[in-house]
Amino acid sequence: MLYLVPTPIGNLGDLTYRAGEVLSSADKILAEDTRQAKKLLRHYEIDTAVESFHMHNEHRRLNGIVEQLQSGMEIAQISDAGMPGISDPGYLLVRACVENNIPLTVLPGASAFLPALVASGLPCDRFYFEGFLPPKKGKNKRIQYLSQSEETVVLYESPHKIVKTLRRLIEFLGADRAACLARELTKLHEEFIRGSLEEICTELESRSKIKGEITLVIEGKKK
């Protein structure tokens, strides 16, 4: 059995009771970053063995893990934070399990885009989740595509790229498009910056340093 286990996106107290049980009872844990995983496991006094499984080795390790699952092992997979498979490793292993009739289950839990979306004050009955934009090639093309969405759009971005990304969004979507930037979700310095894309960008440009992974929620194109 494969268990996909979401982990806290900031506040360690957000690990569910069931997730803790699964991580404690699994034969081993596959982690995107073993150092991050061990911090969480130490907090909950979980001593299950941890192995690395990330975007740079998942193709190489896939067949071996499938064989271990077929032999009867129970394996839990976690990412650095949030839900495995959502802008994190997970899809390839799930697909391999489906193709090989290996049972799997996904535990519900933390993911950054849902708290950011709900707290934004923008319509959340329908939305488009983009995740991370392409790093370079194709970025403008994706933004042009998103500019036509009538649904609320949700993006992930790193702190050192966010100002540049906001300037590109302003170019294609307009300075007045409403948005909400969520930063340091569930942590002590959690912050929501609401306003137009221009207002949010101006606020960030006034800061000497921007910290924390960022979720940006953008109003859809008005009909």
Image (cartoon, rainbow, N blue to C red):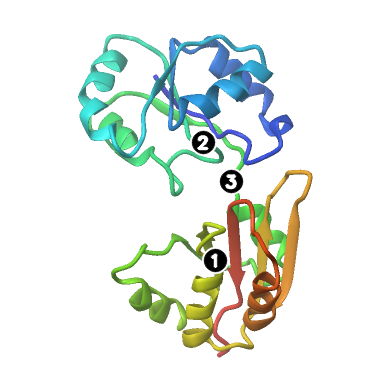
The residues bearing labels 3 and 1 have C-alpha atoms spaced at a distance of 20 Å
For mark 2, what is the residue? 80
Within-10-Å neighbours for mark 3: few <14, some 14–19, many 20+: some
Residue 213 in the image: state x and y as whole percent.
58, 52
Amino acid beneath label 1: Ile
Residue 130 in the image: state x and y as whole percent.
45, 63
Q: Which mark is residue 162?
A: 1
Residue 67 in the image: state x and y as whole percent.
23, 16
Residue at the location (62% across, 51% down)? Answer: 212
Residue 216 visible in the current orientation:
yes
Amino acid beneath label 2: Asp
Residue 150 visible in the current orientation:
no
Residue at the location (57% across, 58% down)? Answer: 159
Q: Which mark is residue 151?
A: none
216 left or right of 199 in image: left
Residue 98 in the image: state x and y as whole percent.
29, 33
Q: Mark 2 or mark 3: which is in front?
A: 2
User: Disc 2 or 3, which lies upstream in sequence?
Assistant: 2
Amino acid beneath label 3: Ser
